[in-house]
Image (cartoon, grey):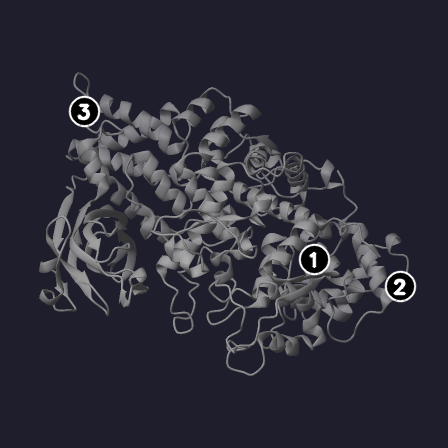
Amino acid sequence: MLLKYWPAANQRPQKMLSFLTACIVVALIVPFHKASADNFANIAEPFFQSYCYRCHSADEKTKGDVDLKEFASDASITKDRDMWLDILYLVETEEMPTKEPLPTAAERAAFVEWLDSKVNSVDWSKVKHAGYVPMPRLTKKEYNNTMRDLLGVDVQPGHILFEDGEGNSGFTTDRSNLFLSPAAMEKYIEAADKALDAVIGGIEPISKTFEAENMLSTANIKALSSSLRGGGEGVRLTIGQTTMYESLEVPADGTYIIELRGQSANADNGSALVRLNNEPVGLATFPGEKASVQELSTFIPKGAHQLTINKGIDARRIIKDGNKTFLKEVVFDWIKITGPVSAMNRRSNKPRYSLQPKPGISEVESVREMMIQFLVRAFRRPIKPSTLEKYVDIFKNARAQGAGYTYSLRQTMLAAMVSPRFLYRHEFGPSEDGTREEYALDDFQIASRLSYFLWLSMPDDELFKLASQRKLRDPEVLRSQVKRMLADPKSRDFSSTFLGQWLKFEALGKDVIPDSKTFPEYNKQLSDAMKAETILTFEHLIAKDYSILTLIDSRATFLNEVLAKHYGIDGVEGNHMRPVRLEDPHRGGLLGMGSILTATSTPTRTSPVIRGIWVKENLLGERIPEAPADVPEIDEKAGIKKKTTLREELQIHRDNPDCARCHDKIDPIGFGLENFDGIGRFRTKEFSGVPIDSRGEMEGFSFEGAAELKAWLMKHRKDQFVHTVSKNMLAYALGREIESFDEPAISKITKALAENDYKASILIQEVVLSYPFLNKSNSNEVNPHE
């Protein structure tokens, strides 16, 4: 029987349901009879009692956090449709149950027919519902960016805030997960205070220069002294652990400029690695012709730090010159630290706001004029006169108590910067009393949705102007603004955040770190280059308006010298990323990128299981159940120390019928990527020396290696991939989990993509033009039968 929910891949259930939950729920099967004439009480309830309540009720235990006694009617199924779609999928495909008693074929068919009639009897294309989004608090990234654009200085005051967790949508933009605790509120007060220090705190910039010969070193500096071409003496950062270090104290949080003078000791480029407190800051690459000054920048918190310099990772590469073999080395002259940049800008640039009393008017009038401008920007919408006067009163009260003008103004601004109107995005409608009233967002709310979607920051002057003119519901105006905003450098945060969280490589180099003994080549420079490759490729296809299908397969990517050497590609020199044409058909697209391949490996080896699940879930939007708790994990050393290969180890695991149900659907995909090791290098043999077997078969389609796997995806899963990308982009933009009633919006997006060669600009424009992006409901509940 082919069910109504299953013909189109993009209509398969999306929501994760635990493996054990599915096992028990499948036991809902009932004695065979005409299901369509029955209801929940006649079919489900008796079998809940017999098979399910022992594991899924508050009276006993609730495996998978599912209490089936919460469901007592057909209507209750409609309200939690996604979960019941999961149940339907698992029962119909006979994935569950795995233990006795098992339903007969007739019992299974009866249950499937009945449940299918309940969850798929609705034509969702005729249901118009915008969905509910809680009043959105700014994420940590949004807070930092908003402070930057509000105050005109980039001091990243949010670095002291707690990290944002992912919500049900898989993104940190998910507003259901962004609450504000009392402890967090204290952090916001401290952060706002730090930000105001940079604007009106009187902090003076510093400039400190450390000469190499005067710095502390792990080696004999005199023995390493070397002349620089172009004049001057420096210290050669040579083989071994030669490290220069010095103490550094900075007066305030902020971005600091780091300049280094030096040269490569050889004809080829050389590099020096700068660290703060043993954390890499950046790589300064020097040409060999003559000495030059290279510049880096980084955020440094207020206080004392240890500054260190040693040779870059590429200095380990051997260079052959005739009969001589030597290591690349750098001659280091001096390092200079200047900042914070915010204090330097305050000296040279006109302040964004008038922070001193204006001549010819009273102090109170000066503050009133300044706070009108400040509050409109801070609250991202026009303010009422009564709101303005509340803040003017703060200034007047402070002055009445003897505080100076600057301090009183600072306290007034601080009060606004910890107000809910600043920390949250205003999306109130005509009714916030819990009713189901649905309403169109006003122009200022659309301006904020648009700017926080594509910039993770507040609207700029142009968006404010268009909002005041009430033009932001005009489709052509919105399309024009999307193009403008994506061309702005501020859109980098959109690219990195969306991609990192959708594709699950954001934690690479932070929480996800390969084992240093197994993969000693992996370091921060390589990790940063891997992530930059994915982000720049995405930005390039947006800028050139290429097809989003190039994410599956492409003949070009972005590389620097470190990553190119890692991939075995010659002719790429220097630390900057640049477009590179690919000759190897295995390498192009997401499945050939080091960020993806490393993030989907274990610390010590590849994992066909993790990689297969990643493709199914993140590229195809399918739900893969969690493995039962009593199933042992594959040994971390599988395929490394034992005589068996990793494929053979997994085959032993799959001999268990309970395991084979899922592994038969995910392992072949993972095996197609086995030519890439745990950090994304191409290989033809396993650790043991046995040739890699990268063959796989999915639904009758045989493939070998990444190139043929990508061909399978393009031929048989293109529509499913487009649906998944569209769904994730919409969820990210809305800041909530996608619901069944969002299907009309997703269908409209995918249809527009298909009609426009899948151009990336169409994807983002259609998300912005979608009904749920421009509207909001006070409730997620919907009765599709109304």
Camera-nearest residue between 116 and 314: 314
Location of residue 463 in the rendering, given as x and y in whole percent from the top left corner? 44, 27
The answer to whether residue 457 is left or right of residue 687 is left
Determine the CA span between mark 3 and mark 2: 84 Å
Q: Secondary structure at mark 3?
A: loop
Q: The N terminus lies in which quarter of the figure?
A: bottom right
The answer to whether residue 410 is left or right of residue 697 is left
- Disc 3 designates what residue? 357
Q: Is residue 14 visible?
A: no
The answer to whether residue 421 is left or right of residue 231 is right
Name the quadrant containing residue 626: bottom right
Specify the amino acid type for callout 3. Pro
Label 3 neighbour load within 10 Å: few <14, some 14-19, many 20+: some
Residue at 77% across, 64% down: 28
Give the mark nearest the N terminus, 3 or 2: 2
- Disc 1 designates what residue? 86
The answer to whether 344 is drawn above or below residue 365 in the figure is below
Q: Secondary structure at mark 2?
A: loop
Give the mark nearest the N terminus, 1 or 3: 1
Specify the amino acid type for callout 2. Phe
Q: Is residue 9 visible?
A: yes
Determine the CA span between mark 1 and mark 3: 64 Å
- Disc 2 designates what residue? 32
Specify the amino acid type for callout 1. Asp
Circles 1 and 3, Cβ within 8 Å, touching? The answer is: no
The answer to whether 84 is drawn above or below residue 755 in the figure is below
